[in-house]
Image: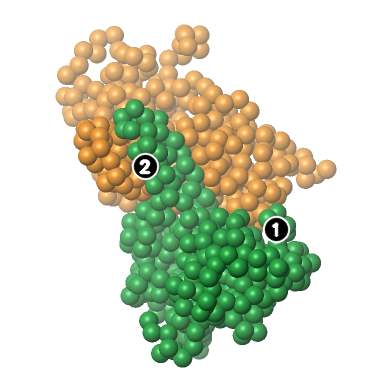
Chain colours: A green, B orange
Amino acid sequence: MNLSDKGKIVRISVDAMGGDFAPTEIVKGSVDAAREEGVEILLVGPRDIVESELRKYDTDGLSIQIVQASEYLVEGEHPAMAIRQKRDASIVVATKLVRDSKADAVVGAGPTGGVVASALTILGCVASLSRPVVGGVFIGLNKKMVAMDLGGNVDCQPYQLLDFAIVGIIYAEKYLNIENPRVGLLSIGAEEGKGNAQNQESYPLFKDSGLNFIGNVEGHDLLSGRADVIICDGFVGNIVVKFTEAMGNATARWLEKNLSGKIADEELRALTMAYIAETNPAGALGGGPLLGVNGVVVVAHGRSKAPEITGAIQQARYAVETGLVENLKVELEKAHQAIENRKEQ
Amino acid sequence: MNLSDKGKIVRISVDAMGGDFAPTEIVKGSVDAAREEGVEILLVGPRDIVESELRKYDTDGLSIQIVQASEYLVEGEHPAMAIRQKRDASIVVATKLVRDSKADAVVGAGPTGGVVASALTILGCVASLSRPVVGGVFIGLNKKMVAMDLGGNVDCQPYQLLDFAIVGIIYAEKYLNIENPRVGLLSIGAEEGKGNAQNQESYPLFKDSGLNFIGNVEGHDLLSGRADVIICDGFVGNIVVKFTEAMGNATARWLEKNLSGKIADEELRALTMAYIAETNPAGALGGGPLLGVNGVVVVAHGRSKAPEITGAIQQARYAVETGLVENLKVELEKAHQAIENRKEQ
């Protein structure tokens, strides 16, 4: 994409102090992103620390500024408490740059709770969402399916599930290039009327929504490819995601036992590591835009090294350029208006 | 066990016409059970058909009778409708033998819906259960853990979940030989108060129940061994079970792709088949006592051949001799009484 067409270089604030390998890897990844992605970077953290890292690189011709923040969050703090007590924490300052239109997006590598709490407190959610939606591709064995909510929201009302579907559709369209994604409601039987009370209340709402709703889908459809977007309560989603990760680890152990001596140890290790990666939701979900927040916030893995930080910044740029947040707002508004219109008829 | 100690030979009615390989394999498995298990068998079905099968074997000294039933259920019928219309169906007649104390247990290999419908209509459930509980060991990767409910009951009330726990404990004690099984409530966070409204209401009830309650467990604990009995709503359980089966199949395909050429085709096929067996809930759940029914009803796989029928009859004998149903009634009654007593205090 020719950025000059848009007349504006994307400006991204990065929490230089967030993540297991901060600030070294964060600064390195940011410098690479400035060079490779042509973005402006605002590195947020204690000026002396960030500056001494930044001096390691040739930044000639790159647009990288340091924004002073005297504190930063550490793993193990209560996120909401921490951001209240540390008003000058790097993630707080970085997120405020987005609120104040001094940056187009913020990237933080952790603690995840702190990135989410800052986003919620400082940016808030788009209308009709009370919390961000947790979702996306969660299993490598089915890379073309978006599932949500995976743990952000429980005891969801039908209208919330419908909002998740709209978020999921936009995610599938923008990130997986799926046209007119097929939406399924996770249940325990395919026909309308099957499932629990939540399903039974939600089904007619989905049917009348104008979305490409294919009806109820079942547990096996999380892998079958029958739907592109699968919607469930965050309670079910979270249990499935944690079970998936456990299946990966248990299967790796099973393969070690059953293949030991049959293939070379090295090959076996590569196989089990590849399988764990295929079934590791953290790998798929750890990094990505926080969906539903009123601004572009990209959460990077806590274990991110420079290339992952560059990737997260690339994701942030992409979300800004494709208007992820604006699209979400428009589509949610359209859907709500359509529901209102039907009610009035 | 010396049967004469009990002063009574266990008498089992078998639906000779149920299952994919009826009547041939059912009759053969029943003859073997009469010989190996020392049980009395009542073979139920059209007399001429059953008799011509039975004549193939030397039944000298065995206690096998034929009980006439003119009809039988076939796959694809609506179970409840079918048993209402076919009043002389073999599964109906076989189940009535238990109701009328002419048999101690009934074994049916399908259609599963028909066996369940007959059990519910003719025997009913023990007090406080409105439907049988679907549960047991559902994944070979964790053979010492009982999960329930796996799809029999949705939108469960806290007291229902507690009843499932009692059923699960008895199952774990009798079938897995686990002493004082640890009970966990499936949730999305370990601490009390985590999870959905159902969790939050159920937790105190479990805590005060006198059961060996270890608190909330999470999705990964379905494989971790932290709990012996894991309790959830049948909605969540059913989704997890179907997802597990899909994981087995998807993983088998993944292994075929990633191991092809690295080990012999035959070895690879054996490996994937073994893995599918480890993750096939139908294998674990397809055959077993219907838990919560007011009488011993063993559902055998639809695909059962003679050895599986003999196994199902062995299970039925075991359930009768260990007093599965009586134990359930007593323990449920005790738990309800304890809850009532606490309420009054």
Chain ID, mark 2 = A
For the C terminus of chain B, the quadrant is top right
Q: Quadrant of residue B53?
A: top left
At 68% from the left and 55% from the top, the residue drawn is: A75
**Is A318 above or below relative to B130?**
below
**Marks 2 and 1 in Cβ contact (< 8 Å):** no
Q: Which residue, given by chain and number where applicable, does mark 1 sit on?
A: A74
Instruction: Residue at 29%, 24% (x, y): give it.
Output: B307
Q: Circle 2 is placed at which residue position?
A: A271
Q: Given the image, what chain letter belongs to the residue carrying mark 1?
A: A
Residue B297, label in figure: none
Residue nearer the viewer, A341 or A336? A336
Observer able to see residue A173: yes
In the rendered image, the vertical position of residue A23 relative to residue B175, given as above or below: below
Residue type beneath disc 1: Val
Mark 1 Cα within 10 Å, few/some/many (few <14, many 20+)? some
Q: Nearer the viewer, residue A306 or B123?
A: A306
Residue A236, given in percent of the width and then of the height, sits at 52, 56
Crowd rating for badge 2 (residues with CA inside 10 Å; few <14, some 14–19, many 20+):
some
Say what secondary structure mark 2 lies in: helix
Instruction: Count the numbered circles shown.
Output: 2
Q: Is residue B292 visible?
A: no
Identify the image quadrant of residue B50.
top left
Residue A235's x, y, as percent? 56, 57
Spatial CA distance of label 2 from label 1 is: 35 Å
Q: Nearer the viewer, residue A112 or B175?
A: A112
In the rendered structure, which amino acid carries the disc numbered 2? Answer: Leu
Label 1: state its secondary structure: loop
Which circle's residue, 2 or 1, is located before the other in the chain? Answer: 1
Residue in the picture at 54% in, 24% down? B177
The residue at the point 47 percent across, 25 percent down is B319
